[in-house]
Image (cartoon, rainbow, N blue to C red):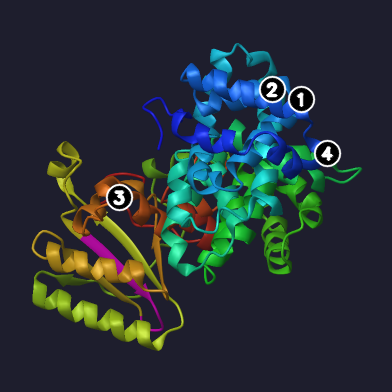
Amino acid sequence: MGSGNGNVQVTRVIDCLLAGAGDEAEKSFGDAITSGRVVRLQAALERLSAEGAGLSILLVALTAEDKISARALMRLVLSGRAAVSGVCPLLNACREDCLAQAISQQSLARRQVPVLRDLMGALFLELRSESNSFPLDPFTPSVLAEAAAPDAALAMEVLNIRGKLGVADAMVVMSLWENVLEAAAQRSSRISELAWILVGKLQQVGRQKQFATCRSWAVLLRWVCSVVRHVDPLEWCCSLEAVASLAMRSGHGQQLLEVLDDLALCTEAVAALRLRLSNRADDLCQDSPAKEGYHAVHASSEDRESSWPLFELRAVPCWVADSDALAEVAKELERIAEESSTIRVALDSEWGSEGDLDKSLPPSVLQLAVDVDAPKAWVIDAKRTSQELGVMLSWLLKHPRVRLIGFSFRQDAMRISRLLPEVSDLGQDGVAKLLEAKVHDLQRILPSQGSWPGLGAVPEEQLGLGLDKRLQGSER
């Protein structure tokens, strides 16, 4: 689909594009395209094809010269015979890394922002245009995500435009969503710029400053309501919580609250966000004398004993040492799932010193707990039960009523994925990413000032209880 440097060569697509040029193309575009533009576009296609130039370079060059011609090119790609062969190359060419390289090669760094804004705006307009015969329908979410990879923000908006998403698409979407959240936490300029294109028109007079501050959070909320909600109907509010926490962590909770009614979100989302943004956690993210030292106190929690009453386990963990005992655990989980509308299953793993030396090893121990009226907890010998444990974990991942919970779960996902069957088209790293996306990581959802909160700080802040961590080797 793409060359090694990420640019798509247009040699195989060019014939389809040229077939649509001339009088037929002029009629298709109406008044937006004159004969002169069609001739110039055809000449540019022929020249760049002969030079072996990439589609990214062509798009950037046309946008810098004449944004209408750039949109004309996209219309040609997304119409008639070119549609099927052109959609994925076009998405591949509009990836952030490909466009940045094209802009650098053409010495357009000083015009980068307006060129990218015009180009991406044209792309989204054409993808939504009725004249392109809805070319996204034949493509599965996984194919579209792959075409846009690794640009998760582009993929999320493309899936939003495609629509018709369901629970079966959850793994693809939630993997993208995790990457988008991480990019937003790192103040991604890509998300910030796409926000102006996608939600900029929502800003209202008198609140422009607040909107500008919160535009990245606004576009994330757009994707929660229009994409995540359809693939994760039971737990999509957790994704709202994650965005609210990011906004508060950056000190923008109050500004987001002020523009909340401007963002055209669904009623349930607005209500949940207003409640979340109005609570005391927002105050913790503001710079005020009353809050000085808050982060320092929590950051040093691993070096002190908690002054809070200690949390007491509601269930005594059972040791699972062999396959027969694990089979009983699996039966109990199936019984609970049949009797519950939603069950929360917490996962954690340990891998010992040998695992520290070899990061490709699976965990030696897996801890699993279920939050029901009579809570259950198990500590499982993963070495002795690895095959059967992998089957049980796969069942948990696929069950529609199971909500998986973890804390600082990225390393756990890498280890636990070694127990799961490898999916041929994903590879082991792909399985790890899907597992990480499926698990609700409390460290990333719960609010804290500065970096992600440590394990000791969370129960103190949320429950007013401390953890007995005398036998724990790390804070996370």
Find disc 1 in the rendering and name its residue: 36
Image depth: mark 4 or mark 3 in front: 4
- Disc 4 on helix, strand or loop? helix
Q: CA distance from mark 2 to mark 4?
A: 16 Å
Q: CA distance from mark 4 to mark 3?
A: 46 Å
Find disc 2 in the rendering and name its residue: 40
Q: Position of residue 18 (x, y in %)?
A: 58, 33
Find disc 3 in the rendering and name its residue: 426
Is disc 1 surrounded by few (<14), some (14 to 19) or many (20+) residues within 10 Å?
few
Q: Looking at the image, which residue is at 45% across and 62% down?
A: 170
Is disc 4 surrounded by few (<14), some (14 to 19) or many (20+) residues within 10 Å?
few
Mark 2 and mark 1 residues within 8 Å of each other at the beta carbon = yes
Q: Where are the magenta residues, as a range?
A: 366-374
In primary-sequence order, the first of circles 2 and 4 is: 4
Mark 3 and mark 2 residues within 8 Å of each other at the beta carbon = no
Front residue of 242/18: it is 18
In this picture, residue 262 sits left or right of residue 273: right
In this picture, residue 267 sits left or right of residue 174: right
Type of amino acid under label 3? Leu
Image depth: mark 1 or mark 3 in front: 1
Find disc 4 in the rendering and name its residue: 31
In primary-sequence order, the first of circles 3 and 2 is: 2
In this picture, residue 252 sits left or right of residue 452: right
In primary-sequence order, the first of circles 1 and 3 is: 1
